[in-house]
Amino acid sequence: MNDPRFPVSQEYAACLVNKYWRALRDGPFHELGWDRLAEVLRESAMSVAHAQAIADAFEEQCPTPADIKRVAFNLRPPQPDPIEEWKKQGLQPDPGFGEELIAKIGKGPDWVEKLRWDSIKEALQNERIGKDFKNFWGEYLATMRRDFPAEVAAIAAGRNPSQAPRPRPPVTAVSERSPLPPPPENPIRCDDVDRAVAENHITRCPNCEGTGRLTDSFCDCALGQDLERIARMDERLDPGYAGEIRELHKGSKAS
Protein backbone atom coordinates (compact mmCIF):
# COMPACT_ATOMS: atom_id res chain seq x y z
CA MET A 1 0.00 0.00 0.00
CA ASN A 2 1.85 3.06 -1.29
CA ASP A 3 0.93 6.61 -0.34
CA PRO A 4 2.48 9.49 -2.30
CA ARG A 5 2.53 11.60 0.86
CA PHE A 6 5.21 9.39 2.45
CA PRO A 7 8.59 8.50 0.93
CA VAL A 8 8.52 5.01 2.50
CA SER A 9 5.93 2.41 1.53
CA GLN A 10 3.93 0.42 4.06
CA GLU A 11 5.49 -2.83 2.80
CA TYR A 12 9.04 -1.54 3.33
CA ALA A 13 8.20 -0.27 6.81
CA ALA A 14 6.67 -3.66 7.68
CA CYS A 15 9.86 -5.38 6.50
CA LEU A 16 11.98 -3.18 8.76
CA VAL A 17 9.68 -3.87 11.71
CA ASN A 18 9.80 -7.63 11.17
CA LYS A 19 13.55 -7.68 10.67
CA TYR A 20 14.70 -5.44 13.51
CA TRP A 21 11.95 -5.39 16.15
CA ARG A 22 10.32 -8.82 16.13
CA ALA A 23 13.10 -10.31 18.26
CA LEU A 24 13.04 -7.51 20.85
CA ARG A 25 11.25 -7.80 24.19
CA ASP A 26 7.93 -6.20 25.08
CA GLY A 27 6.59 -6.40 21.55
CA PRO A 28 2.88 -6.34 20.64
CA PHE A 29 0.85 -9.50 21.27
CA HIS A 30 -1.34 -9.07 18.19
CA GLU A 31 -0.52 -8.60 14.53
CA LEU A 32 -2.49 -5.38 14.51
CA GLY A 33 0.04 -3.96 16.93
CA TRP A 34 2.90 -4.74 14.54
CA ASP A 35 0.94 -3.18 11.69
CA ARG A 36 0.50 -0.05 13.78
CA LEU A 37 4.27 0.18 14.41
CA ALA A 38 4.93 -0.14 10.69
CA GLU A 39 2.37 2.57 9.98
CA VAL A 40 3.95 4.98 12.47
CA LEU A 41 7.41 4.24 11.07
CA ARG A 42 6.19 5.00 7.55
CA GLU A 43 4.57 8.28 8.65
CA SER A 44 7.62 9.39 10.66
CA ALA A 45 10.36 8.57 8.17
CA MET A 46 11.48 11.34 5.82
CA SER A 47 13.43 9.01 3.55
CA VAL A 48 14.48 5.38 3.20
CA ALA A 49 17.78 6.08 4.94
CA HIS A 50 15.91 7.85 7.73
CA ALA A 51 13.62 4.84 8.20
CA GLN A 52 16.66 2.54 8.36
CA ALA A 53 18.26 4.75 11.01
CA ILE A 54 15.08 4.67 13.10
CA ALA A 55 14.94 0.88 12.92
CA ASP A 56 18.61 0.58 13.96
CA ALA A 57 18.08 2.85 16.99
CA PHE A 58 16.25 0.14 18.99
CA GLU A 59 18.26 -2.91 20.02
CA GLU A 60 16.78 -4.23 23.30
CA GLN A 61 13.14 -3.21 23.78
CA CYS A 62 10.47 -2.94 21.13
CA PRO A 63 9.48 0.72 20.71
CA THR A 64 6.07 2.24 21.18
CA PRO A 65 4.58 4.67 18.65
CA ALA A 66 5.69 7.55 20.89
CA ASP A 67 9.27 6.16 20.93
CA ILE A 68 9.31 5.94 17.13
CA LYS A 69 8.15 9.54 16.73
CA ARG A 70 10.66 10.83 19.25
CA VAL A 71 13.60 9.00 17.70
CA ALA A 72 12.49 10.01 14.21
CA PHE A 73 12.51 13.65 15.25
CA ASN A 74 15.97 13.36 16.80
CA LEU A 75 17.41 11.53 13.77
CA ARG A 76 15.82 13.71 11.09
CA PRO A 77 18.27 14.93 8.43
CA PRO A 78 19.42 18.55 8.50
CA GLN A 79 16.73 20.88 7.23
CA PRO A 80 17.53 23.57 4.66
CA ASP A 81 17.67 27.15 5.82
CA PRO A 82 14.32 28.77 4.93
CA ILE A 83 16.03 32.10 4.26
CA GLU A 84 18.30 30.46 1.69
CA GLU A 85 15.27 28.82 0.08
CA TRP A 86 13.54 32.19 -0.14
CA LYS A 87 16.66 33.69 -1.74
CA LYS A 88 16.58 30.95 -4.39
CA GLN A 89 12.99 31.99 -5.17
CA GLY A 90 14.11 35.59 -5.66
CA LEU A 91 12.99 36.88 -2.28
CA GLN A 92 15.28 39.06 -0.19
CA PRO A 93 14.95 39.61 3.58
CA ASP A 94 14.34 43.14 4.76
CA PRO A 95 16.27 43.73 8.02
CA GLY A 96 14.34 46.89 8.83
CA PHE A 97 10.88 45.48 8.21
CA GLY A 98 10.16 44.70 11.84
CA GLU A 99 11.29 48.10 13.13
CA GLU A 100 9.36 49.86 10.36
CA LEU A 101 6.24 47.84 11.07
CA ILE A 102 6.33 48.60 14.79
CA ALA A 103 6.94 52.29 14.09
CA LYS A 104 4.00 52.49 11.69
CA ILE A 105 1.62 50.68 14.02
CA GLY A 106 2.54 53.05 16.80
CA LYS A 107 1.46 56.06 14.73
CA GLY A 108 -2.22 55.24 15.01
CA PRO A 109 -5.11 53.46 13.25
CA ASP A 110 -4.55 55.35 9.97
CA TRP A 111 -1.18 53.71 9.52
CA VAL A 112 -2.69 50.31 10.34
CA GLU A 113 -5.16 50.81 7.50
CA LYS A 114 -2.34 51.78 5.13
CA LEU A 115 -0.44 48.63 6.09
CA ARG A 116 -3.54 46.57 5.35
CA TRP A 117 -3.95 48.23 1.96
CA ASP A 118 -0.29 47.61 1.12
CA SER A 119 -0.59 43.94 2.06
CA ILE A 120 -3.79 43.57 0.01
CA LYS A 121 -2.03 45.16 -2.98
CA GLU A 122 0.94 42.79 -2.63
CA ALA A 123 -1.39 39.79 -2.26
CA LEU A 124 -3.25 40.76 -5.45
CA GLN A 125 0.03 41.09 -7.33
CA ASN A 126 1.22 37.67 -6.16
CA GLU A 127 -2.16 36.17 -7.09
CA ARG A 128 -1.92 37.72 -10.54
CA ILE A 129 1.54 36.29 -11.28
CA GLY A 130 0.82 32.98 -9.50
CA LYS A 131 3.47 33.47 -6.84
CA ASP A 132 2.17 32.12 -3.57
CA PHE A 133 4.27 30.47 -0.85
CA LYS A 134 2.24 27.59 0.66
CA ASN A 135 -1.02 29.39 -0.22
CA PHE A 136 -0.23 32.15 2.29
CA TRP A 137 -1.45 35.01 0.12
CA GLY A 138 -4.48 33.03 -1.04
CA GLU A 139 -5.70 32.50 2.51
CA TYR A 140 -4.96 36.13 3.36
CA LEU A 141 -6.92 37.38 0.35
CA ALA A 142 -9.86 35.14 1.24
CA THR A 143 -9.94 36.72 4.71
CA MET A 144 -9.68 40.26 3.34
CA ARG A 145 -12.40 39.62 0.77
CA ARG A 146 -14.64 38.43 3.58
CA ASP A 147 -13.91 41.25 6.04
CA PHE A 148 -13.08 44.18 3.69
CA PRO A 149 -14.66 43.39 0.32
CA ALA A 150 -14.98 47.04 -0.75
CA GLU A 151 -11.31 47.78 -0.06
CA VAL A 152 -10.13 44.72 -1.98
CA ALA A 153 -12.35 45.62 -4.94
CA ALA A 154 -11.09 49.22 -4.91
CA ILE A 155 -7.42 48.22 -4.81
CA ALA A 156 -7.94 45.63 -7.57
CA ALA A 157 -9.59 48.32 -9.74
CA GLY A 158 -6.83 50.85 -9.06
CA ARG A 159 -9.01 53.17 -6.98
CA ASN A 160 -8.24 54.79 -3.64
CA PRO A 161 -9.33 52.35 -0.90
CA SER A 162 -9.87 55.18 1.58
CA GLN A 163 -13.01 56.17 -0.33
CA ALA A 164 -14.47 52.66 -0.21
CA PRO A 165 -17.39 52.11 2.18
CA ARG A 166 -16.21 50.57 5.39
CA PRO A 167 -18.07 47.66 6.97
CA ARG A 168 -19.84 48.52 10.17
CA PRO A 169 -21.11 46.11 12.80
CA PRO A 170 -24.89 45.78 12.94
CA VAL A 171 -26.46 48.14 15.45
CA THR A 172 -29.24 46.76 17.60
CA ALA A 173 -32.23 49.01 17.96
CA VAL A 174 -32.98 50.33 21.41
CA SER A 175 -36.45 48.79 21.33
CA GLU A 176 -34.96 45.35 20.62
CA ARG A 177 -32.63 45.40 23.57
CA SER A 178 -33.61 43.36 26.62
CA PRO A 179 -34.57 45.63 29.53
CA LEU A 180 -32.49 45.39 32.65
CA PRO A 181 -34.18 43.55 35.52
CA PRO A 182 -35.29 45.78 38.40
CA PRO A 183 -33.16 45.67 41.52
CA PRO A 184 -34.47 43.38 44.29
CA GLU A 185 -36.46 45.04 47.06
CA ASN A 186 -34.64 43.16 49.81
CA PRO A 187 -31.19 42.23 48.51
CA ILE A 188 -29.27 39.50 50.28
CA ARG A 189 -26.28 40.86 52.15
CA CYS A 190 -23.20 39.19 53.56
CA ASP A 191 -24.56 39.50 57.09
CA ASP A 192 -27.70 37.62 56.06
CA VAL A 193 -25.63 34.79 54.64
CA ASP A 194 -23.47 34.53 57.76
CA ARG A 195 -26.53 34.53 60.02
CA ALA A 196 -28.28 31.82 57.96
CA VAL A 197 -25.20 29.64 58.05
CA ALA A 198 -24.91 30.05 61.81
CA GLU A 199 -28.58 29.27 62.41
CA ASN A 200 -28.56 26.15 60.24
CA HIS A 201 -25.20 24.84 61.34
CA ILE A 202 -25.50 21.21 62.46
CA THR A 203 -22.87 19.81 64.78
CA ARG A 204 -21.69 16.25 64.30
CA CYS A 205 -23.17 13.76 66.74
CA PRO A 206 -20.46 12.54 69.16
CA ASN A 207 -22.08 9.07 69.48
CA CYS A 208 -22.23 8.07 65.78
CA GLU A 209 -19.72 10.66 64.46
CA GLY A 210 -22.27 11.91 61.96
CA THR A 211 -23.13 8.53 60.37
CA GLY A 212 -26.50 7.97 62.10
CA ARG A 213 -25.60 4.30 62.68
CA LEU A 214 -24.21 2.54 65.72
CA THR A 215 -22.75 -0.94 65.85
CA ASP A 216 -26.09 -2.78 65.98
CA SER A 217 -28.70 -0.02 65.94
CA PHE A 218 -29.58 3.44 64.79
CA CYS A 219 -28.42 6.49 66.69
CA ASP A 220 -30.85 8.72 68.62
CA CYS A 221 -29.67 11.83 66.75
CA ALA A 222 -31.71 13.49 64.02
CA LEU A 223 -29.81 11.71 61.24
CA GLY A 224 -30.24 8.32 62.94
CA GLN A 225 -33.99 8.89 63.29
CA ASP A 226 -34.22 9.80 59.60
CA LEU A 227 -32.33 6.64 58.62
CA GLU A 228 -34.58 4.52 60.82
CA ARG A 229 -37.69 6.06 59.27
CA ILE A 230 -36.36 5.36 55.76
CA ALA A 231 -35.51 1.79 56.74
CA ARG A 232 -39.07 1.21 57.99
CA MET A 233 -40.38 2.47 54.65
CA ASP A 234 -38.11 -0.04 52.92
CA GLU A 235 -39.81 -2.87 54.87
CA ARG A 236 -42.86 -2.44 52.69
CA LEU A 237 -40.77 -2.31 49.51
CA ASP A 238 -38.42 -5.20 50.31
CA PRO A 239 -39.91 -7.85 52.66
CA GLY A 240 -36.60 -9.68 52.81
CA TYR A 241 -35.08 -6.65 54.48
CA ALA A 242 -37.69 -6.60 57.30
CA GLY A 243 -35.79 -9.06 59.54
CA GLU A 244 -32.66 -6.93 59.61
CA ILE A 245 -34.69 -3.81 60.34
CA ARG A 246 -36.46 -5.47 63.27
CA GLU A 247 -33.13 -6.59 64.77
CA LEU A 248 -31.74 -3.08 64.51
CA HIS A 249 -34.91 -1.67 66.04
CA LYS A 250 -34.73 -4.12 68.97
CA GLY A 251 -31.13 -3.22 69.56
CA SER A 252 -31.89 0.52 69.60
CA LYS A 253 -34.79 0.00 72.06
CA ALA A 254 -32.69 -2.21 74.35
CA SER A 255 -29.91 0.36 74.52
Image (cartoon, rainbow, N blue to C red):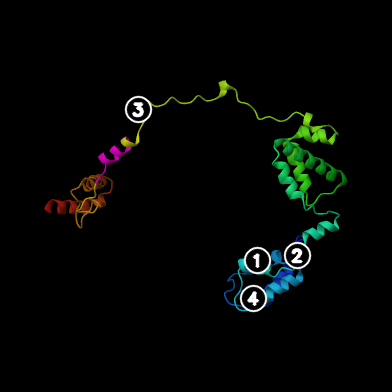
Q: CA distance from mark 4 to mark 3?
A: 73 Å
Q: Residues within 10 Å of mark 2 (few under 14, many from 20)?
A: few
Query: Which residue is denoted by mark 3 in the rendering?
Result: 186
Q: Amino acid at mark 4?
A: Phe
Dominant secondary structure of the residues highlighted in magenta in the image:
helix
Please give the label number shown on residue 128: none
Q: Closer to the camera: disc 4 or disc 2?
A: 2
Above or below, 35 against 165 in this view is below
Secondary structure of the residue carrying tag 1 is helix
Marking on residue 79: 2
* Residue hosting label 1: 69
N-terminal label among 4 and 1: 4
Mark pair 3, 1: CA separation? 64 Å
Quadrant of the rendered structure where residue 182 is? top left
Q: Please identify the residue farthest to the right as the structure is shown.
A: 129
Q: Are marks 3 and 2 in contact (CB under 8 Å)?
A: no
Residue 101: give x, y in percent of width and height.
Answer: 73, 45
Residue 181 image position (x, y, % from top left): 46, 26
Above or below, comparing residue 199 to residue 252 in the picture? above
The span shown in magenta is 192-202
Rounded to the nearest angstrom, the CA distance separating label 4 from label 1 is: 13 Å
53 left or right of 249 in image: right
State the SS at label 3.
loop
Residue identifier under label 4:
58
**Viewer-closest of 133 and 20:** 133
| Cα separation between marks 1 and 2 | 17 Å
Where 140 falls versus 46 (above or below)? above
